[in-house]
Image (spheres, rainbow, N blue to C red):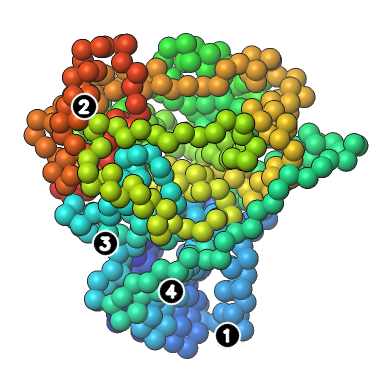
Amino acid sequence: MLKFVLNAGAARGIHWRWDGSAWQNGDSWISPVRHSALTHRMVLHEQTVLVISRERRRGDPEVGPRAPERVSAGALADLVAETAQWPLDATLLRLNAGTVTLQAGVWAVAPIYLTSGPDRLAGSWQPTDLRAYADTSSLSDNEVARLLTRRHRYGQETVWRAVKRLTERSVATWRDGTLQLAYPSPAEHTSPRPLRRSADVLGAFESALDAAVHRREFAPHQCGVELSGGLDSTNVAATLAGRGARMTTAAVLMDGSCGQAQRSRRRQLTEEFRCGADITVEATEHLPFHPDGTRGRQLPVSPYAEPWIEAKQPMLAGMAARGVRWSFGGTGGDELMNVRSAEKSESRHARPVPPWLGKRSIAAAAHSEDGIAPPSVLRESTLLAFGSRTPQFLEHGLWPVSPLADPQLSRFCEWLPLPWRADKTLSRLRLSRLGLPLSVYCGLRDDPRETLDIAFRRHVLPFLEDMCAEGGVLVDSGYVDADGLRDTTRAVRRMGDKFALDRTLFTIAAVEAGLRTCASA
């Protein structure tokens, strides 16, 4: 929600002013995300400066950032207490007596990345803003290894040692030029419960989902849905349509048999929900690492960016051009119907070490659990997805909304016995009750691997071959073994379509591109 640069003097002063885009105090500044979904206030009491950024609840008035307001000690305390219990996204920034304190809320939709020095603290929801501190000679072994082995964990570490992530409910404190981050207490989760014989599970689920969608303030005529045609986004779209919202829909369309089924489902859904404009982008025309795309042109890109940023670029631009300001989606749906490890019949086997993994990554992989965040209110994978997706949405003036990640809805689903959650049975039954065609909720799940395979062979494989020949950050630093990677790329060329691609190969290219572009920008 915020970008800022603060020096030690500003942390002690109260002489702030609003200039129309940011609060300024000398060469220090705090810039909030300007969006109707959010409210931002700066309040002053004696030597304390407080910036409160919150997502609007249903019925909250729209209040844009303005000149600092002086408040009483009691009002200041009330604002702090209220924000600590805020049900939606929230961030609290406090400056007092040379100390800066930053606290994240439960949602952490737009996590803030932080870096500091003796005289300055900088933060941003866009990690590429901090690329001046993206030193490729000082990388976090544990975090790089997590990415390259696809053992993603949520925590303060980023690939750059100098840049930290403010995780949900965490507190960052900057005092005397030193930045310290403290994790919160572990969030409590619950277990399945027996159901009453008369329990209307579907009705309760629909009510909880409706509450999750409408817990926040939004303008129906400015809302869109990233409607992939999958179960999760379809359930969200159905809830919006049930209240008469004439929403804009958007999607990146995949190739192959998966894409054909996706197109068929989406045609039925947009007709059934009486949607407005439908913005679609062919993934094959905007493949990852396409020469004209973000990574192909070597523009700054985060190592954490999602795979489809090239295709999402025109999709989000199209939504913004149509006046969409709130983008609803199905993020959190997999976690909502999560089957716990103890409920799974099959055991998990240790993954073999791939030939391209370097000695430095192999050594660090044993420490992948070190320093990670405690159990969070929202699911760990959902929070990681926010970090990879949100910056691109905000760059286009869109606020991403993920109702399926709602804590109260999640608590309800945690209570449900396994048969309701397995294979997303509850989600499928809900769409059946709505009378939607069988093909919408009983077909095979979407699988983008065919399209990703095209991207890999056209654009990613040549990128990896260049890494083998010319070196790169990951190879030169010992995270990737050049000989092992070279053998693998040659096997891909030799075997063609018979080679079963490992998605980790794409991850190597994505992380390398992020490290290079941030270091060279």
Label 4 neighbourhood size at 10 Å, few (<14), some (14-19), many (20+)?
some
Three-letter amino acid code at disc 3?
A: Ala
Give the structural element (helix, strand or loop) at label 2. Answer: loop
For residue 354, above or below residue 192: above
N-term mark: 1 or 3:
1
N-term mark: 3 or 4:
4
Identify the residue at image location x=25%, y=31%: 355
Q: CA distance from mark 2 to mark 1?
A: 57 Å
Mark 2 or 1: the one toward you: 2
* Residue placed under numbered mark 4 in the picture: 101
Q: CA distance from mark 4 to mark 1?
A: 20 Å
Give the structural element (helix, strand or loop) at label 1. Answer: loop
For residue 269, above or below residue 498: below
Circles 2, 3 touching at the beta carbon (< 8 Å): no
Residue 246 is at least partly visible in this image:
no
Three-letter amino acid code at disc 4?
A: Thr
Residue 217 is at least partly visible in this image:
yes
* Residue placed under numbered mark 3 in the picture: 162
Q: CA distance from mark 1 to mark 3?
A: 37 Å
* Residue placed under numbered mark 2 in the picture: 291
Three-letter amino acid code at disc 1?
A: Ser
Q: Nearer the viewer, residue 153 or 53?
A: 153
